Image: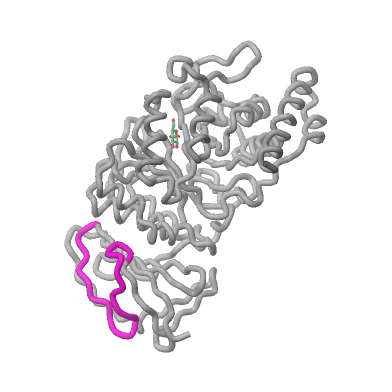
Amino acid sequence: MNQLKKILSSIITVVITGSVYAQDAAAPVAVAKQQVADNSNLALTPPMGFNTWNTFQTNIDEQMLCEMVDTYVSSGMRDAGYKYFVLDDGWMSMDRDSTGNLVADPKKFPSGMKAFADYVHSKGMKFGIYNCAGTKTCAGYPGTRGNEYQDARLYASWGVDYFKYDWCNTDSLNAREAYITMSNALKATGRPIVFSLCEWGNHQPWLWGKGVGQLWRTTGDICNQFDKDKVIGTWTAQSVLTILDKQDKIRQYSGPGHWNDPDMLEVGNGMSVAEDRAHFTMWCMLAAPLMAGNDLRKMSAQTHDILTNKEVIALDQDSMGIQGFKQLTMDGVEVWVKPLSGGDVAVAFLNRSGQTQAITYVWAEHNIKDAISKVDVDFTKTQYKVRDLWLKKDVGTTKGMYKQSIPSHDVLVVRLHALNQ
Ligand code: GLA
């Protein structure tokens, strides 16, 4: 009930300030009078959800999306932790209305955007939407430039909980300033809205994004290929491994409430099951936002099992929020480590090579020291239980060695839990 009162009062604030703006262009004065949202507790773990772009691009409509929402619940995605249902580019009409407001395309959304947002909320999820800092979005729909406060108020009035802000058609705009303006506009609505910065890592958002938003893209767009980039006309979409290789050196900038975002998931979009499993595991090792991008209505049992593996998701959602790092490489296999709360540690073995690799891993030869999390693991002093998170089975301890065979482009991931402490 209190929550409902809070929401109602922020909606009233929006309505009141909306009329102030309509009569008076003195924005800073109006902003000072508003109740500003406190976003400091938003996204304390990496946001999880679904986004329309990777599968549907701009081919979205209310009916298909309602089916997706329903499947999101019936398939167990929501219960596995996926919370946000995000519409990417293509939801708008080509023109703003006579008051300057953006309009949901009436052909795609005959019931209007508020009704769709209400539907998402009625299923126990949160609702997200997209726009661009430039004059037009990447797909050519009306952008936000010059309308930041008006657009933010519209989103808040619809009940938007998550906003992705892209970077096409921005000419000479200063990225940091443009994102701060939109961040302030969102906060000024009084509604807590997760702010997802999407300027592809061009202006090092990890250096200034904390406090502006809760996550920032670190690279250009991902594609559904594991180790080969894809040339698409004038630009190149990046493979899973290309993106992975760009994350290690910026890991110190990620943490609770401010995440590096290596782009949305391509699980279930055409890679092999091994590659999907490796992609998903590595994104969890990176504490990456997990935005599914597949057609949930058609997902195979294997895709479902990957996306909803709770023990692997738990690595991603660990409350310490430490981004994992590469510990070493041996024979085409990379060993990645992610310190976890309670002294646990995740260790992933990623086979990047084209052949199956047999590994013999002597734990005592690979103690773990991490300057960022201050984690210091000495396997000669402390013994750990080893649990394989894809087999969902305990597989021994760190006393001996870990012998496994890893197929090409596949992964093994274990969780270590101290035994004698
Ligand atoms: C950019 C973004 C993508 C997607 C498209 C939409 O390329 O990086 O994630 O939002 O625009 O046009």
Q: How is the image coloured?
A: one colour
**Is 255 displayed left or right of 10 in the figure?**
left
Where residue 278 sits: x, y (%)?
30, 56
- Residue range of the region highlighted in magenta in the rendering: 389-409
**Is 331 displayed left or right of 24 in the figure?**
left
383 or 337: nearer the eye? 383
- Does residue 244 sit above or below 122 in this rendering? below
**Is 42 displayed left or right of 341 in the figure?**
right
167 or 363: nearer the eye? 363
Of all residues, the one furthest to the left in this rendering is 355
- Does residue 234 sit above or below 363 in this rendering? above
Where residue 43 sits: x, y (%)?
56, 50
Q: Quadrant of residue 338?
A: bottom left
Where residue 414 sits: x, y (%)?
34, 69
Where residue 289 sits: x, y (%)?
47, 49
For ligand 1, give the image quadrant.
Answer: top left
Count of all numbered marks drawn on residues in the image: 0
Q: Quadrant of residue 96?
A: top right
287 or 216: nearer the eye? 287
Q: Visible in this render: residue 217?
A: yes
Q: Visible in this render: residue 334?
A: no
Q: Residue at x 41, y 60 (%)?
A: 285
Q: Residue at x 43, y 65 (%)?
A: 325
Q: Residue at x 25, y 65 (%)?
A: 332
**Is 18 displayed left or right of 222 in the figure?**
right
